[in-house]
Image: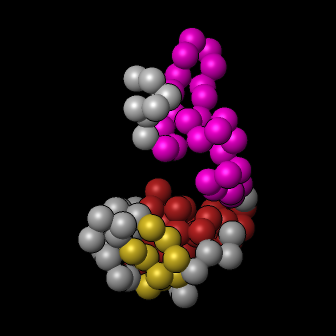
Amino acid sequence: MSGAERPVGLIEQEGDDIQIGVAGDRNLVCQVQPLTGASHDKAVGLAKRYRISIDNATTAASALEAGCTILYSEDFQHGQERDGLAILNPFH
């Protein structure tokens, strides 16, 4: 797939190098939030409270730790709110 055909944000692997298709700089489209003890504890709490998977809870906890107010995800029900985090399905 050429660069012109590649969707924005698609990750392409070539040999040992992984390149991100957005001008080679992931910071243009996202901020990577580290998994910390605090975010893990928050994720466990969210998973128990809302009965969601730990991976979805970790995504929500990381968004909350980053100060996000909206999380776009297909993995949650559209329009839910979790601890002040509005969850929207971008394909809804």
Label count reads 0
Residue farthest to the front, as pictured: 4
Give the residue displayed 62% in from the left and 65% down from the top.
Answer: 62
Give the residue displayed 52% in from the left and 81% down from the top.
Answer: 85
Query: Residue 6 in the image: x percent, y percent?
Result: 43, 34
Query: Residue 78 in the image: x percent, y percent?
Result: 32, 76
Of 22 and 42, nearer the camera is 22
Magenta stretch holds residue 21: yes
Q: Which residues are magenta?
A: 8-35
In the picture, residue 51 is in which quadrant?
bottom left
Residue farthest to the left, as pictured: 92
Of 80 and 11, nearer the camera is 11
In the picture, residue 74 is in which quadrant?
bottom left
The image quadrant where one finds the N terminus is: top left
Query: Residue 40 in the image: x percent, y percent?
Result: 63, 62
Give the main secondary structure of the magenta stretch: loop
Model colouring: secondary structure
Query: Residue 48 in the image: x percent, y percent?
Result: 45, 74
Q: Left of 39 or right of it: where is 1?
A: left
Of 90 and 2, nearer the camera is 2
Query: In this picture, is 17 found above or below 77?
Result: above
Of 48 and 84, nearer the camera is 84
Residue 44 visible in image:
no
